[in-house]
Image (spheres, rainbow, N blue to C red):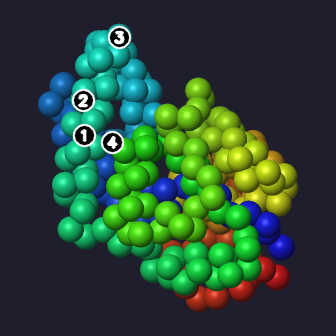
Amino acid sequence: MAKAFLFDLNGTMVNDMPYHIHAWHKIFNTYGALFSLERTKLECYGKNQEIFDRIFPGRFTDEEKNEMSFAKEREYQQAYRPLMKLIDGLDVFLQNAADKKIKMAIGSAAIMFNVDFVLDGLNIRQYINAIVSADHVVNSKPDPETFLKAAAQLQMSPADCIVFEDSPKGVEAATRAGMKSVVLTTMHTTDEFNDPNIICFVPDYTNGLFEKLMQ
């Protein structure tokens, strides 16, 4: 039985990754990286500054990357705000976990600007006992730092944590942290994953997922 749940945010608690991808796609193409949406999807991992460095190595100053990063997040938030909702079943799942006194944390590559946007926009901050965002780590996923820090903040052993992820690199980070994963298939198909520590693949949090994890 799990004693702690660690949630990635985008694509895992809210199905907002298409809005991030479109915002990045606009930036990439504006500055000459003529990527398709599918190629853009593959590059949407890690901190924003890391993405800029990966796609435009040495081209922008740190100040320019920060300015473009916040411009991208404001565009994403404006597009997604009218449609923002939890992934199906997550509201009941969070309440069930809280009732069972299961500790919960967010471990995300998002900056706090976006974490706050979701937590406050959907009024779920009361369920979250710890937050580790891009602002709190040196090394992004697939490095395990995010999830190890989240477990430490909860004062939980990694072996007692279940991670909820939507990306192969996030699952890799969980495995490297010594944790098992539940994969939300909002962004990637099951054949894109190859990890023995995946408990199951699910489209959302319905169909008795909480009860299955409590067995």
- Residue type at numbered disc 3: Gly
**Mark 1: which secondary structure?**
helix
Q: Which residue is labeled 3 in the image?
A: 58
Q: Residue at x 64, y 88 (%)?
A: 208
Q: CA distance from mark 4 to mark 2?
A: 16 Å
- Dot 3 crowding, Cα within 10 Å, few <14, some 14–19, many 20+: few
- The residue indicated by pointer 2 is 68
Q: Nearer the viewer, mark 3 or mark 4?
A: 3
Image location (x, y in percent) of residue 179: 77, 54
Looking at the image, is 27 positioned above or below residue 215? above
Residue 210 point in image, percent of width and height: 67, 81
Query: What secondary structure is found at the residue carrying circle 2?
Result: helix
> How far, Cα to Cα, is label 3 from label 4?
19 Å
Q: Residue at x 22, y 37 (%)?
A: 71
Q: Quadrant of the C terminus?
A: bottom right
Mark 3 or 2: the one toward you: 2
Q: Where 169 sits versus 140, above or below?
A: below
Compared across the picture, whether 134 is left or right of 164 comes to: left
Q: CA distance from mark 3 to mark 1?
A: 19 Å
Quarter holding the N terminus? bottom right
Q: Nearer the viewer, residue 55 or 1?
A: 1
Which class describes the residues within 10 Å of circle 2: few (<14), some (14-19), or many (20+)?
some
Helix, strand or loop at disc 4? helix
